[in-house]
Amino acid sequence: MAQQLRGEEDLLAEWLPALRDGLARAGAAGLAADGEVGMAFYGDLFRPAGELLAVGEPVYRAADVAEGFESELLLAWWKAAAAADPAVVAPGADTLVRTPRMAQTALLALSASPFMTGLALRAMVGDLKQVRGYLLDPATRLKARRSTAFPWR
């Protein structure tokens, strides 16, 4: 999620040292050679057509959070962040009103969470849309699974 502006080699370079460290700490055999692990990548499915090297995200607002899956996922993120961090205002009965007001309140509360630090509101809304697209749009999910960037397919 939210890696559409990167690529499989860039992501693998970040994740591989952590994977090797984890294997070492667990006492497991290390990776024999580079190339033994590959990184799946399908972030390009979430970039606007013709903008392969785009540096920005679509300009989303709280009003762009759709009712149903997106607003329910946003509320779940909010509840989890509030449970993990007392600095995040927990959802209360007086704030759980219809989208976009609930979305605005949730996005504001999440912005105080260290899990979301540095994420702009539009990026959080974009992440909601990306998760919904992958989980609920069979065509998007099929394209991701058939991606040539899946090294083990």
Image (cartoon, rainbow, N blue to C red):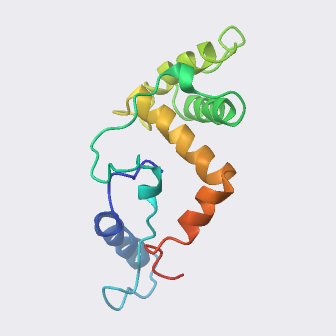
Seen in the picture, residue 33 relative to 73 is either above or below; the reply is: below
- Given residues 85 and 37, the one toward you in this image is 37
Is 9 situated left or right of 114 in this image?
left
Is 14 situated left or right of 28 in this image?
left
Residue at 47 percent across and 56 percent down: it is: 45
Work out which residue is located at the far bottom of the displayed protein and give it.
32
Residue 27 at what x, y percent from top left?
Answer: 44, 82
Residue 28 at what x, y percent from top left?
Answer: 46, 84
Residue 91 at what x, y percent from top left?
Answer: 64, 20
- Say which quadrant the C terminus sits in: bottom right
Seen in the picture, residue 15 relative to 106 is either above or below; the reply is: below
Work out which residue is located at the far top of the displayed protein and give it.
94
Is 104 situated left or right of 58 in this image?
right
Residue 107 visible: yes
Work out which residue is located at the far front of the displayed protein and give it.
50
Seen in the picture, residue 30 relative to 42 is either above or below; the reply is: below
Residue at 27 percent across and 52 percent down: it is: 53
Residue 76, quarter of the rendered image: top right
Is 33 situated left or right of 111 in this image?
left
Residue 103 at what x, y percent from top left?
Answer: 58, 21
Residue at 43 percent across and 73 percent down: it is: 149
